[in-house]
Image (cartoon, rainbow, N blue to C red):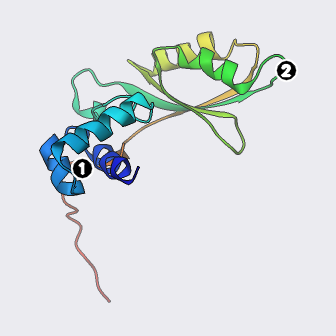
Amino acid sequence: MEAEREVLDVLARNAREDIEDIAAQTGLDAEGVEAAIASLEADGVVHGYQAVVDWDRTEDGKIRALVEINVALDRETGYEEVADRIAKFPAVDALHLVSGDYDFAVEVLGGSMDDVSRFISEQVAPMPEVTQTVTHYIMETYKDGGVRFADGDDDDRLSVSP
């Protein structure tokens, strides 16, 4: 299990890491790395491999929003059922049951602010269990998926000392 954890740590930092490089970083041989990855995938620990995209740097950028959702549950409906319905929408990029002032934190991707607003108002808010939604549009992303987004500009302010 220790070997799988080491491989998992490397994959979490860079899922495109070469098998031989992972082996060198973990002290395993290539076959051990491949076996660890296969086991992590089979056990449902690793669900997929994704690129971390800075949508602001693409021609057809996407609008991202964080949506807080409160729900009222009854005896027949639990969080899992509500989460299953919300997660099925392609616009939902991430969905989390959270503690605090609201029940679910949802990351939504859309082509425009209007697309996101319509999705929430027409698809999510009308669900019988949903009692409140609050949408926060992401204005700038500085770090995502553990990757820091840099604009390439160094801080050019003059330092002032007393």
Residue 2 visible, this angle: yes
The residue sitting at the right extreme is 75
Residue in the foreground of this view, choosing between 150 and 34: 34
- Amino acid type assigned to the residue bearing label 1 in the image: Ala
Q: Which mark is residue 74?
A: 2
Q: x%, y% of residue 52? A: 29, 36
- Seen in the picture, residue 48 relative to 115 is either above or below; the reply is below
Q: 46 or 71, which lies in front?
A: 46
Q: Which residue is mark 1?
A: 150
Q: Residue at x 29, y 30 (%)?
A: 55
Q: Amino acid at mark 2?
A: Asp
Choose mark 2 or mark 1, whichever is in front.
2
Secondary element at image label 1: loop
Residue 114 against residue 28 in the figure, above or below: above
Quadrant where the C terminus sits is bottom left
At label 2, counting other C-alpha atoms closer than 10 Å, the crowd grade (few under 14, some 14-19, many 20 or more) is few
The quadrant in which residue 58 appears is top left
Taking the spot 68% from the left edge, 18% from the top edge, the residue there is: 81
Q: Which residue occupies the extreme bottom position in the image?
A: 162
Q: From the top left corner, tell me how far across and down residue 154 is, in percent.
A: 19, 59
Left or right? Give the position of 58 relative to 109: left
